[in-house]
Image: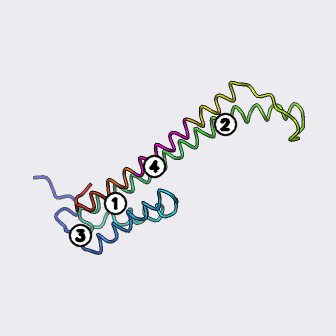
Amino acid sequence: MPPPTQGSGVVPSTGEFGIAWVVYAMFGFGIFLWWPALFAVLVCHLRAGSLAAGFLASHYRWLARTFWLSLAGYVLAVGIILGGAWPLVRDILAQVRERGDWSVSTSFGLAWSSLFATIGAATLGGLLLVGMWCWFIYRVVRGAVRLADAQSI
């Protein structure tokens, strides 16, 4: 027989369930604001190792992974957008360097390839941002449903 896992067989207290629901609510607000999810992930890391958490420890680990993986996805998406803007910025800076003029009245001749690279990267990065946002919502809702059914995840 395998050794019991941490918190196995322990029925979490009502207070522990309350903490879990508050954490899920903070992640719910984190869909629109970043700071509630930041506080919630701190609570997740503090509560995940608690023996009193029982099966709720799986929820805390689930939410912590959700936070860190979505953060990595958001950083990647923004990196794609900024990296894709570089060809356009490079062309503009090269023309300004040639002219020595930052005047707004000056028109810039942009290469179509730079423009398409920027638009393509912005589209790809934007789609990745939307995808990560939907994935974050899915993970929070799925975990909350499992918590409502008093099941581990």
**Residue, disc 3:** 12
Q: Nearer the viewer, mark 2 or mark 1?
A: 2
Q: CA distance from mark 1 to mark 3?
A: 13 Å
**Residue, disc 4:** 70
Mark earlier in primary sequence (1, 3): 3
Q: Quadrant of residue 150?
A: bottom left
**Residue, disc 2:** 85
Of helix, strand and loop, which one carries label 4? helix
State left or right for residue 117 relative to residue 131: right
Q: Residue furthest left?
A: 1
Mark earlier in primary sequence (1, 4): 1
Would you say residue 133 sits in the magenta stretch? yes
Q: Nearer the viewer, residue 79 or 109?
A: 109
State left or right for residue 36 relative to residue 2: right
Q: Residue furthest bottom?
A: 15
Q: Quadrant of residue 111?
A: top right
**Residue, disc 1:** 60
